[in-house]
Image: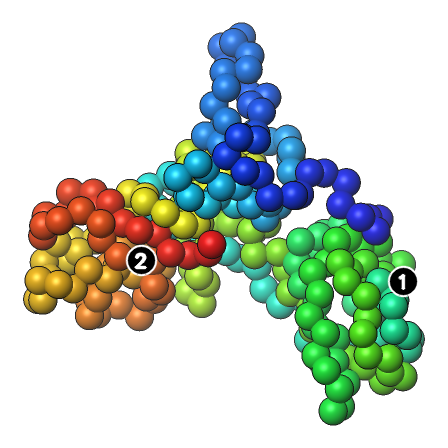
Amino acid sequence: MSKHFKKPFNPIPWHGSPHDFSSANGVHNRNLGIYATEDTQRYIVGTRLTTWDGRVFKYIYAEKACTSYHGAVTLATHAYAGEALVSSVVVGDTSVLVTQTGFTEDELQGGFICVYGAGSHAMNRLIVGNDATVGTTTMIYIDGPISVAGDTLYHEVFQNPYKRCSGTPQVYSCVVAVPAANIAVSSYGWGQTWGPCVVSPAEDVGTRSVSQDRMVFDTATGLLKANGAADTYRQNAGFILNQGVTTYGPLIMLQLSI
């Protein structure tokens, strides 16, 4: 179990770019930095990195293979909702016991839990770790103390959105990052969430009915669509930076998460 993160998790500034432990063809330490992918976890999934020019990247895990020029969607779901806590909590507690089964140690790490009661504040906390399920209960450790006590409180648990990324189109899923490199299944890497970025477009991005219409949207396929395009899976991706109507690029100001 983890009452505290066991791997690096602090935001990484540009001068602290991650070391590259990857190797290929007998050549080690190729210094690929954020463009390296590995099957070994180096950071807490969801760790934030910024470059000197303000681009933002998140450390992601590919449950399914992800492509560098497409948006990667999350398969993370709500783990459970509306269940009562097993026991009462007091102000200052940093762990809660829930009646949920089937979790391995730290499976929920980086996810979120909301604890609430009738007429009380909703306490949204990040999950720093969890014990493996014992019987029918699971102990969850949170990043901030309980601030409202109660004998009957309920909870909702949500998985880490960066821990189950996929390059395979999914309905009812959102794009969370654009991988900095192709990431093989069951591997770790970095995905861009903010700043100038090239994402593969659908054909209608360059065919715009309004010359000043620069907004673009992610789709279920991880491609870009123009504003007003008929697509049921649209999610705001940002706006086009380069001038013109051509579909080359486009270079967009990615605006997923800062």
Residue 102 visible from this viewpoint: no
Q: Residue at x 32, y 43 (%)?
A: 197
| Residue named by callout 2 | 238
Q: Residue at x 13, y 63 (%)?
A: 212
Q: Residue at x 50, y 34 (%)?
A: 14
Q: Quick check: marks 2 and 1 in contact, CB under 8 Å?
A: no
Name the spot of residue 43 as percent of width and height, x first. 64, 38
Name the spot of residue 134 as percent of width and height, x first. 89, 59
Where residue 113 sits, quadrant-wise, is: bottom right
Numbered tag placed on residue 249 in the rendering: none
Residue 195 visible from this viewpoint: yes
Three-letter amino acid code of the residue under disc 2: Gly
Note whether 198 is above or below 160 in the view shown.
above
Where residue 186 sits, quadrant-wise, is: top right
Tell which tag, 2 or 1, sits nearer the viewer.
Answer: 2
Crowding at dot 2, Cα within 10 Å, few <14 / some 14-19 / many 20+, comes out as many
In the image as oriented, which residue stretches furthest toward the top?
Answer: 26
Note whether 128 is above or below 93 in the view shown.
above
In the image as oriented, which residue stretches furthest toward the bottom?
Answer: 119
Q: Secondary structure at mark 1?
A: loop
Q: Nearer the viewer, residue 153 or 105?
A: 153
Q: Residue at x 69, y 60 (%)?
A: 126
Q: Secondary structure at mark 2?
A: strand
Q: Nearer the viewer, residue 252 or 1?
A: 252
- Side of 214 where 123 appears, left or right: right
| Residue named by callout 1 | 135
Three-letter amino acid code of the residue under disc 1: Gly
Crowding at dot 1, Cα within 10 Å, few <14 / some 14-19 / many 20+, comes out as few
Note whether 230 is above or below 56 in the view shown.
below
Note whether 211 is above or below 245 in the view shown.
below
Name the spot of residue 146 as percent of width and height, x first. 82, 71
- Side of 128 where 231 appears, left or right: left
